[in-house]
Image (tube, rainbow, N blue to C red):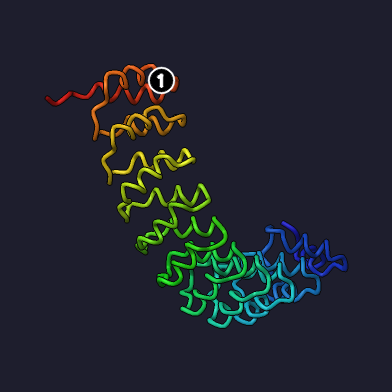
Amino acid sequence: MPSPEDIESGLTHADPAIRERWAGRDTFVPTPAQIERGLCDPEERVRWTWAQRRDFTPSAAQVERGLSDISRDVRWAWAMRTDVRPTAAQIERGLTDEDIGVRLTWVERMDFSPTAAQIDRGMADTVSGIREAWARRDNVTPTAAQVERGLADPDPVVRETWLQRGDWVPSADQVDRGLHDPDDNVRHAWSCRLDFTPTAGQIAQLLADPSGPVRCTTALRPDFVPTPDQVERGLTDAFDPVRQAWVRRRDYTPTAGQIERGRADANPYVRAEWDERLKEPTVD
């Protein structure tokens, strides 16, 4: 444990690198005067280090000064502090910060309820990462217009994120557009949703999708009865998980040839699925 004299000497050293190192040490509890002096240090790395300490409760004035610091790194460090309750003005300033990292940190905070204007502005942010973060927030209820904008976002990651939300029901037009999305992950996300019933044509399209994961998820959907051709194509699919998924379905009776071929499958997991299936009692 350093002596009070050593602590004070380190925190007031002429070299900012030494002041920074001392500000980051957890072997002492700083006094209110040392905290205030450190948070006002002319060197931003020193202020940044002090902002990351969690062994003191900052005053309202210190929080305000930190959140409006000229340094984006210092503002980010203060935005990361969830031990202080921000004011409405501080939230608004953070959500409109010129720095992407600071803005993103505020969007990811869940200790405030954003206004309708903040939500709409954030979901239309020029930075796709910000739009994605807003799409992930679970304490907002999007409007129909916001959902539509999200599903048509130029960034496929944002479109996929919107598909992971369960608080909206897609229209027939949105489903059709989504199932034709050029991005494999987006189409896969659509194939995972069970809040719409695909048409026979859409099922046929999904089962023939160039993406193996899309074909696999579709093969597990309970909302269609496959044709014999679809069963045969699924059981001979080049993607192992697709064949495995088709063996799991119980709404068709495999032929003797399909059983024989399946039990000799090159993939051990597919063979295991067939073994489990064939152990089940048959119903006359």
Which of 250/95 is in front?
Answer: 250
What type is the residue that disc 1 sits on? Asp
Q: For residue 169, what is the image quadrant?
A: bottom left
Q: Secondary structure at mark 1?
A: loop
Q: Is residue 115 left or right of residue 253?
A: right
Residue 149 percent location from the top left of the image: 49, 68
Does residue 92 sit above or below 11 in this rendering?
Answer: below
Residue at screen point 87% across, 65% down: 15
Neighbor class of circle 1 (other Cα within 10 Å; few <14, some 14-19, many 20+) is some
Residue 75 percent location from the top left of the image: 67, 71
Q: Is residue 65 left or right of residue 260?
A: right
Does residue 222 sit above or below 81 in this rendering?
Answer: above
Which residue bears the numbered disc 1? 265
Count of numbered circles in the view? 1
Residue 268 percent location from the top left of the image: 42, 21
Does residue 158 sit above or below 47 in this rendering?
Answer: above
Q: For residue 230, what is the image quadrant?
A: top left
Residue at screen point 76% across, 61% down: 22
In the current view of this chain or complex, which residue is farthest to the right?
14
Which of 123/11 is in front?
Answer: 123
Does residue 49 sit above or below 114 in this rendering?
Answer: above
Q: Give the quarter of the figure containing the N terminus.
A: bottom right
Residue 276 percent location from the top left of the image: 29, 24
Q: Is residue 34 left or right of residue 139?
A: right
Q: Give the quarter of the figure containing the C terminus.
A: top left
Which of 268/107 is in front?
Answer: 268
Residue at screen point 79% across, 67% down: 11
Residue at screen point 45% across, 67% down: 148
